[in-house]
C-alpha cells in the first residue's frame, strides 16, 4: 500500500531527475486561503492537480481573484548537497500576481504585496521567483512539500510559464552587478553574499562604429557586505559593457550602460509630409485631421480634391466638417513656407471603416498615473504642437484613469472630477487644432484605479463622452471581474458581452469613436476583437520600463498575433515607455537603455502597434524626440497595407522580424537580445530570410548602406532596415 502511494505521488508530480536538479510539472491546487495549508502534514489528496506551465484560467479555474494555494510534492535528491555552496534553489518561475512560499512548513520567500498587506515586498507577476533555502530545511531523498500561497488581483492567475525547478543556486542568486551613468562616468558596483572571486571586465565601445576604445580586466575578490566599485569615463557616443565571471559559478553577471545617441537626422527646413497616407471617416461623422508637415513655420496649407462639406484651415492645416457621400477621395496636400513648397498624395476614405492605420498619440497613464489633470493634458497637447510631434501624425490625446467624479449625478450621468473642470472645452480646443480627445472607462462598476466604471450606465456614458467630443475610448475590464461569473459561463461570448454592449452605444453616437479594448489578452481577444467592432485590443498585462517587460511583450507575446492585425483593427502591445515615466507625480527617465529604446520603437513600428506616447511631451528630451519622430520608421508603422511583422529567424539570441509594405518593399529588424554586441554580416543575415539586396535603407540613420559589410548590433539593440524589392 505504502509503495503504491509513493508510486502514485511520483506519477502525479511528473518530475524528472537531471544531474543538477529536479523539474516538477504539476502540483495540487485549491482556491481559498488557510494557514493550515503551509503544513507538510496537511492532507491535500482531495485537491485538484494543475500544470505549472499554464495559468489556472487556462485549466478551467475562473474568478479566483483572491487567494489560492499550490502544494508541490517533490523528492529532493541528496546529490544537491554538493556544490560550492550547500544551499538549495527553489526556482518557481514567475507567478501571477504575488506569492508567499513555505518549504516543509518554514517560510522561505515572498514576492509582491496584496492589497492592504502591511509587509511590502518588491516584485510583481513577472518577477522570477528564485528562493535560496538553507539545506537544513530539506528532507533529503524524501518527499518535501513546497506550499505556495498565491494572490491574484485580476485574471489570469497562478504559475504560468514553466515547470518548477529545484537545483543549485547560481552566481546571480548571491551576487549583484549595478551599473549606472554617474556624471561622465560609468560606475559598476559588484556585491556578493558569499566569499568568492573572479574577473571583472569593462569595455568601452564607440556606438556607431562598434570600435573598442578601452578595455580593462581585473581579478576581483568578493566578500560579503563589501561592495567592489569601479568606474570608467564615458564621454561622447559610447557605451560601457561590464562582465563579471566567477571562479566558482558557471553563470555570469553582465550589464551595459550607454550615453543616449541620436540617429535620426534633423528634418529639413522645407516642408515634408510625415503623416499617414490614408484616413477613414464614417459618412456624416466629423472629420478631424491635421496635415502632418515638418519644416520651418509659419506654413500655409492647401488641399485639392476635398469633398463637399470638408474644409481646410489654411493656417493650421486642419481639416474639419463632414462628408455624407461614401467613397475614396484622392487629395493632394500642399504645404508652403519661406524655404519652399511640398505636395503629398493622400486618400480620404469615407466609409464604414475607421482606424485604417494604427492610432498615434499620447496617453496619460505611464507618466502621470492617477495624478493626471486637465492642466497636464493641456501641457502635453500644447507641446505636441509646439515641439512638432503633431507634424509626425501624433494626434490622439488620451486621458486614462482618474478623471472621473467620485459619484454619478442624480440622473445617473457621469462627470469629471475637479482636476478636469471642463471636458467639452478641452475637446473643442483639441479639435480646433486637429487633435483628438481620448477617454477611459470600464465595463465594471469601478476602474482599475478604483474610480467609477460604466456598468449599467453604458448608454448614458457613451452619450456623455460623445457630447464632450470624445474620439477614443479605452475600455478596461478591471472591475468587470466582479460581475463576471465564469462558473456559470466562461465562454468566449461571455468575454465579448460587455464589449459588444458598449460598442452598440458608441456606434449610435454622431461621431467616430476609436474603440480600444483593454482586457490584457484574455480569451484570445485577438480572435474576436474585430467581431465586437474594436479598433484595437490590448494583448498583454501592463508594460513597464524594463527590458524583461518590453522585450517579453514585443518578442514573445506578439509572436503568433500578426494574422489578426489589419486596417481598422490592431493588436495593442501597450503604450510606449520612452522619455519620462513614473505612473505618478514622481517622474524619472525610462529605465530602458538607449539601445533598448531603439528596439522598443522598432518593434512597435514593425508590429503595426498603437503608438501612444507615455511621457509628458513638454518635458521631452531630444533623444526621445529622435525616437518618436523618425518619419521613415513611423511610415512603416503607418503603412497602408497594415501587415504586422512576423518573426523569420531566431538563433543565438538574434531575431529577424519583417513585414511587407505597400510600395513593394520590406521592413526588416535584426535584433540582438544578447548582453554584448554581435558583429553581423548584413548580406548573410538577409539571405537567411531569403532576401537578396546589395544596398538597403538604414531606417534609423535614414541612409542607404551596403549589405556587403559587417555591422555591430549593440546588446539589446537593433539594425532596422528597409529593402526595396
Ligand atoms: C490597467 C490598464 C492600464 C491603466 C490602468 C488604469 O492597469 O491596463 O493601462 O489603464 O488600468 O487604472
Image (spheres, rainbow, N blue to C red):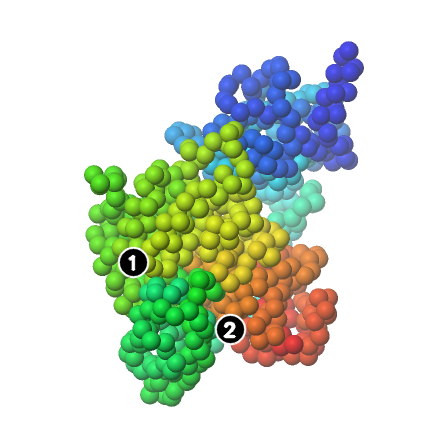
Closer-to-camera residue (452/420): 452
Q: Position of residue 445 (x, y in %)?
A: 35, 37
User: Which residue is painted at 42% across and 38% down in the image?
Assistant: 480
Q: Tag 2: Cα neighbours inside 10 Å, few (<14), some, or many (≥20)?
A: many
User: Which residue is painted at 64% across and 26% down in the image?
Assistant: 49
User: Which residue is painted at 50% across and 58% down in the image?
Assistant: 569
Q: Position of residue 13 (x, y in %)?
A: 70, 27
In-image side of 246 versus 581 (left or right): right
Q: Secondary structure at mark 1?
A: loop
Q: Position of residue 403 (x, y in %)?
A: 29, 48
Outermost residue, front side: 325
Outermost residue, top side: 1
**Residue 229 in view (yes/no):** no
Compared with residue 661, is residue 672 higher up or lower down, i.e. above or below?
A: above
Residues at discs 2 and 1 in contact (Cβ within 8 Å) = no
Q: How many marks?
A: 2
Q: Which mark is residue 632?
A: 2
Query: Quadrant of the rendered structure where residue 722 is?
Result: bottom right
**Residue 148 in view (yes/no):** yes
Compared with residue 537, is residue 722 higher up or lower down, i.e. above or below?
A: below
Q: Which mark is residue 469?
A: 1
Closer-to-camera residue (277/85): 277
Closer-to-camera residue (500/623): 500
Q: Tag 1: Cα neighbours inside 10 Å, few (<14), some, or many (≥20)?
A: many
Q: CA distance from mark 2 to mark 1?
A: 32 Å
Q: Earlier in the sequence, mark 2 or mark 1?
A: 1
Q: Secondary structure at mark 2?
A: helix
Compared with residue 31, is residue 436 higher up or lower down, i.e. above or below?
A: below
Q: Position of residue 25 (x, y in %)?
A: 68, 32
Of the two numbered discs 2 and 1 in the rendering, the one whose residue sits closer to the viewer: 1
User: Which residue is painted at 64% across and 37% down in the image?
Assistant: 53
Amino acid at each position: 500500500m505504502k509503495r503504491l502511494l509513493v508510486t502514485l505521488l511520483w506519477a502525479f508530480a511528473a518530475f524528472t531527475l537531471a544531474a543538477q536538479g529536479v523539474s516538477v510539472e504539476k502540483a495540487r491546487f485549491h482556491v481559498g486561503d488557510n494557514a493550515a495549508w503551509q503544513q507538510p502534514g496537511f492532507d491535500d489528496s482531495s485537491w485538484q492537480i494543475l500544470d505549472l506551465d499554464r495559468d489556472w484560467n487556462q485549466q478551467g479555474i475562473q474568478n479566483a481573484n483572491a487567494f489560492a494555494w499550490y502544494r508541490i510534492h517533490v523528492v529532493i535528491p541528496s546529490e544537491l548537497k554538493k556544490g560550492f555552496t550547500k544551499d538549495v534553489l527553489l526556482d518557481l518561475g514567475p507567478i501571477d500576481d504575488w506569492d508567499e512560499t513555505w518549504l516543509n512548513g518554514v517560510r522561505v520567500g515572498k514576492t509582491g504585496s496584496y492589497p492592504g498587506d502591511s509587509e511590502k515586498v518588491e516584485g510583481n507577476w513577472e518577477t522570477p521567483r528564485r528562493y535560496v533555502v538553507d539545506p537544513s530545511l530539506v528532507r533529503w531523498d524524501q518527499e518535501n512539500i513546497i506550499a505556495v500561497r498565491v494572490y491574484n488581483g485580476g485574471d489570469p492567475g497562478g504559475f504560468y510559464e514553466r515547470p518548477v525547478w529545484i537545483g543549485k543556486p547560481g552566481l546571480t542568486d548571491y551576487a549583484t552587478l549595478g551599473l549606472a551613468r554617474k556624471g561622465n562616468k560609468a560606475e559598476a558596483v559588484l556585491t556578493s553574499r558569499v566569499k568568492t572571486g573572479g574577473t571583472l571586465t569593462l569595455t568601452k565601445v564607440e556606438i556607431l562604429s562598434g570600435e573598442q576604445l578601452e578595455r580593462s580586466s581585473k581579478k576581483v575578490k568578493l566578500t560579503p557586505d563589501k561592495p567592489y566599485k569601479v568606474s570608467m569615463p564615458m564621454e561622447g557616443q559610447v557605451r560601457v559593457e561590464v562582465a563579471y565571471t566567477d571562479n566558482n559559478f558557471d553563470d555570469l553577471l553582465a550589464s551595459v550602460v550607454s550615453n543616449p545617441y541620436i540617429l535620426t537626422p534633423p528634418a529639413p527646413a522645407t516642408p515634408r509630409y510625415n503623416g499617414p497616407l490614408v484616413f477613414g471617416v464614417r459618412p456624416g461623422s466629423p472629420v478631424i485631421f491635421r496635415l502632418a508637415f515638418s519644416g520651418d513655420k509659419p506654413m500655409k496649407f492647401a488641399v485639392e480634391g476635398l469633398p463637399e462639406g470638408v474644409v481646410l484651415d489654411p493656417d493650421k492645416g486642419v481639416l474639419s466638417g463632414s462628408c455624407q457621400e461614401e467613397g475614396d477621395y484622392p487629395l493632394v496636400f500642399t504645404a508652403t513656407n519661406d524655404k519652399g513648397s511640398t505636395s503629398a498624395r493622400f486618400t480620404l476614405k469615407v466609409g464604414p471603416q475607421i482606424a485604417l492605420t494604427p492610432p498615434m498619440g499620447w496617453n496619460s497613464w505611464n507618466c502621470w498615473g492617477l495624478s493626471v489633470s486637465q492642466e497636464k493634458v493641456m501641457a502635453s497637447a500644447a507641446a505636441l504642437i509646439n515641439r512638432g510631434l503633431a507634424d509626425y501624425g501624433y494626434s490622439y490625446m488620451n486621458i486614462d484613469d482618474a478623471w472621473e467624479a467620485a459619484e454619478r449625478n442624480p440622473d445617473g450621468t457621469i462627470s469629471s472630477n475637479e482636476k478636469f473642470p471642463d471636458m467639452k472645452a478641452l475637446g473643442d480646443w483639441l479639435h480646433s487644432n486637429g487633435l483628438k480627445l481620448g477617454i477611459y472607462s470600464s465595463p465594471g462598476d469601478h476602474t482599475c484605479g478604483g474610480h467609477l466604471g460604466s456598468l449599467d450606465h453604458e448608454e448614458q456614458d457613451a452619450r456623455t463622452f460623445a457630447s464632450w467630443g470624445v474620439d477614443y475610448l479605452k475600455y478596461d475590464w478591471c472591475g468587470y471581474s466582479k460581475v463576471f461569473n465564469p462558473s456559470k459561463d466562461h465562454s468566449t461570448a461571455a468575454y465579448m458581452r460587455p464589449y459588444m454592449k458598449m460598442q452598440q452605444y458608441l456606434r449610435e453616437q454622431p461621431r467616430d469613436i476609436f474603440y480600444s479594448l483593454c482586457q490584457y489578452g484574455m480569451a484570445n481577444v485577438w480572435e474576436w476583437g474585430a467581431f465586437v467592432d474594436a479598433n484595437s485590443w490590448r494583448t498583454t498585462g501592463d508594460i513597464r520600463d524594463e527590458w524583461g517587460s518590453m522585450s517579453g511583450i514585443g518578442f514573445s507575446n506578439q509572436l503568433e498575433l500578426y494574422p489578426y492585425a489589419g486596417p481598422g483593427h490592431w493588436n495593442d502591445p501597450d503604450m510606449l515607455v520612452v522619455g519620462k515615466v513614473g505612473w505618478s507625480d514622481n517622474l524619472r527617465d525610462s529605465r530602458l537603455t538607449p539601445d533598448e529604446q531603439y528596439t522598443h520603437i522598432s518593434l512597435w513600428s514593425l508590429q503595426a502597434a498603437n503608438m501612444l506616447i507615455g511621457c509628458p511631451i513638454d518635458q521631452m528630451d531630444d533623444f526621445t524626440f529622435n525616437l518618436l519622430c523618425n518619419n521613415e520608421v513611423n511610415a512603416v508603422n503607418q503603412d497602408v497595407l497594415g501587415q504586422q511583422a512576423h518573426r523569420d529567424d531566431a538563433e543565438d539570441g538574434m531575431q529577424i522580424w519583417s513585414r511587407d509594405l505597400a510600395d513593394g518593399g520590406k521592413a526588416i529588424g535584426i535584433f540582438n537580445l544578447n548582453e554584448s554586441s554581435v558583429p553581423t554580416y548584413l548580406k548573410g543575415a538577409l539571405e537567411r530570410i531569403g532576401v537578396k539586396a546589395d544596398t538597403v535603407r538604414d531606417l534609423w540613420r535614414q541612409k542607404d548602406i551596403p549589405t556587403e559589410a559587417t555591422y555591430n548590433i549593440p546588446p539589446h539593440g537593433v539594425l532596422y532596415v528597409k529593402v526595396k524589392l
